[in-house]
């Protein structure tokens, strides 16, 4: 029996699909693992810690200084986009009332309310950004650094919604044209990925302290192993009351503020 | 079966077949010469023994897997040095180690990738020194 027109169209359709199929890339390419030899000791002694942490003493900052921001953003090829909507930052300055809303009240002295306070990723003990990331592009290392694997980031921005501190920025546009001077030792990011402070893990691996800490001439930033009782961070914390941003949220921030 | 517009349909199928198979009969009998890869960069000329991190045949077949292992090892495990089978140690870095020798990315990486139709996304973030200098 001759096929109906409907059947003829079906056959034609399947034949067309059949023609195209052989050209599609194979979906099941086997992945052969490469045996990686055990890591050789680095040529430069890396800085290691059980738990990296930072103290910030904003009252030591000289007025109008932005050296930490400049150093960090040059080091990490952070674009200067110049419009608040697309702004990308790893470290910035904020007012006390914004970062310590529970501690702020109308009778605080001007020396506190007008004080610009350096803010960066807190490398939380219990980071919500890590918990929500669907690709594990954001992860926490054993030494406490909350790292990003930009190769894996799909730009869903769940982490930006999860971070209560606004520590993360999305690359809404290609950042390359907005980088004043490219540092060849560090990659840039691409459009559609989120980025944030990495506690200078690439410098620690080379045995160098973070760029912001080195750049600060007033020693307002200290960076050390929190588990070492004789570390600089611990000595500073031992002196008196220190604050962490919004501790009631349970994130366990590891950047401590001395005000 | 009654096929309306028989002429148009048959003609359409014939045209489709010609277009779909065009690359095959157009390229028949023509051999595209393999890419001419340049290895004469200053850094390579200075090497006493002209050897990549692994042997050339291994690199030719597996450099993408090696780089993926380097990437995951460096970012996720913090392994920043690589010891080769014969004991040499290299820094794990695409821009710093690979492009140090292969500073002529256009005549090396790109020629073969273009030939093979591979479009690696490395360079949207990793820096090509010859381009930003
Ligand atoms: S400050 Fe924000 S981005 Fe940094 S670890 Fe905590 S939740 Fe994640
Ligand atoms: S934007 Fe990237 S890092 Fe953030 S949650 Fe999504 S995949 Fe993870």
Image (cartoon, coloured by chain):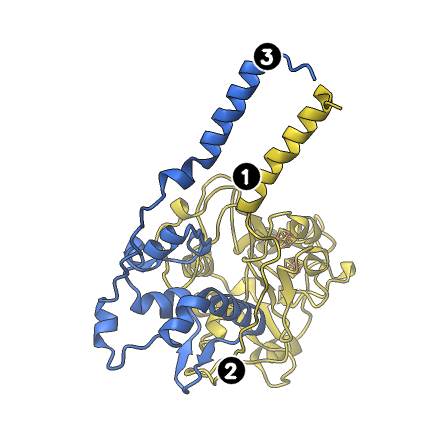
Chain colours: A yellow, B blue
Q: Which residue is mark 3?
A: B5
Quarter of the N terminus of chain A within the rendering: top right
Q: Mark 2 and mark 1: span between their CA atoms?
A: 46 Å
Quarter of the C terminus of chain A within the rendering: bottom right
Does label 2 or label 1 sit earlier along the sequence? 2
Q: Which residue is mark 2?
A: A37
Q: A168 and A237: which one is in front?
A: A168
Residue for point 49% across, 80% down: A46
Q: Which residue is mark 1?
A: A85
Chain of the residue under label 2: A
Question: Which label sits on residue B126?
Answer: none
Relative to A121, does residue A238 appear above or below in the rendering? Answer: below
Q: A175 and B21: which one is in front?
A: B21
Q: Residues within 10 Å of mark 3 (few under 14, many from 20)?
A: few
* Residues marked 2 and 1, same chain: yes
Q: A164 and B105: which one is in front?
A: B105
């Amino acid at each position: 029996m001759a096929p109906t027109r409907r059947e003829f169209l079906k056959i034609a359709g399947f034949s067309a699909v059949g023609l195209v199929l052989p050209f599609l890339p194979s979906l099941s390419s086997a992945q052969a693992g490469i045996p990686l030899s055990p890591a050789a000791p680095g040529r430069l002694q890396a800085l290691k810690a059980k738990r990296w942490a930072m103290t910030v003493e904003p009252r030591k900052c000289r007025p109008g200084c932005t050296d930490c921001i400049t150093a960090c953003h040059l080091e990490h090829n952070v674009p200067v986009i110049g419009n608040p909507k697309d702004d990308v930052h790893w470290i910035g300055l904020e007012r006390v009332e914004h970062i310590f809303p529970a501690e702020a009240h109308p009778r605080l002295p001007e020396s506190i309310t007008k004080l610009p306070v350096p803010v960066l990723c807190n490398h939380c003990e219990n980071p919500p950004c890590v918990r929500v990331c669907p690709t594990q592009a954001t992860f926490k290392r054993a030494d406490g650094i909350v790292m990003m694997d930009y190769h894996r980031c799909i730009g869903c921005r769940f982490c930006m919604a999860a971070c209560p501190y606004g520590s993360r920025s999305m690359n809404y546009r290609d950042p390359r044209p907005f980088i004043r001077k490219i540092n060849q030792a560090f990659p840039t990011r691409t459009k559609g990925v989120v980025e944030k402070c990495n506690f200078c893990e690439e410098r620690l691996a080379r045995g160098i302290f973070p760029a912001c800490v080195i750049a600060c001439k007033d020693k307002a930033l200290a960076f050390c192993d929190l588990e070492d009782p004789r570390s600089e961070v611990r000595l500073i914390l031992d002196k008196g009351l220190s604050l962490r941003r919004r501790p009631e949220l349970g994130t366990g921030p590891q950047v401590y503020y001395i005000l | 079966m009654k096929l309306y517009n028989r002429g148009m349909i048959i003609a359409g199928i014939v045209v489709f077949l010609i277009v779909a198979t065009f690359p095959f009969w157009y390229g028949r009998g023509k051999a595209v010469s393999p890419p001419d890869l340049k290895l004469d960069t200053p850094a390579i000329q200075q090497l006493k023994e002209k050897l990549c991190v692994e042997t050339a045949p291994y690199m030719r077949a597996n450099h993408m897997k090696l780089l993926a292992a380097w990437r995951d090892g460096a970012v996720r495990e913090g392994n920043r040095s690589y010891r080769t089978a014969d004991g040499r140690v290299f820094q794990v870095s695409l821009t710093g180690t690979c492009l140090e020798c292969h500073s002529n990315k256009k005549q090396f990486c790109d020629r073969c990738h273009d030939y093979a139709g591979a479009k690696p996304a490395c360079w949207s973030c990793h820096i090509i020194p010859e381009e930003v200098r």
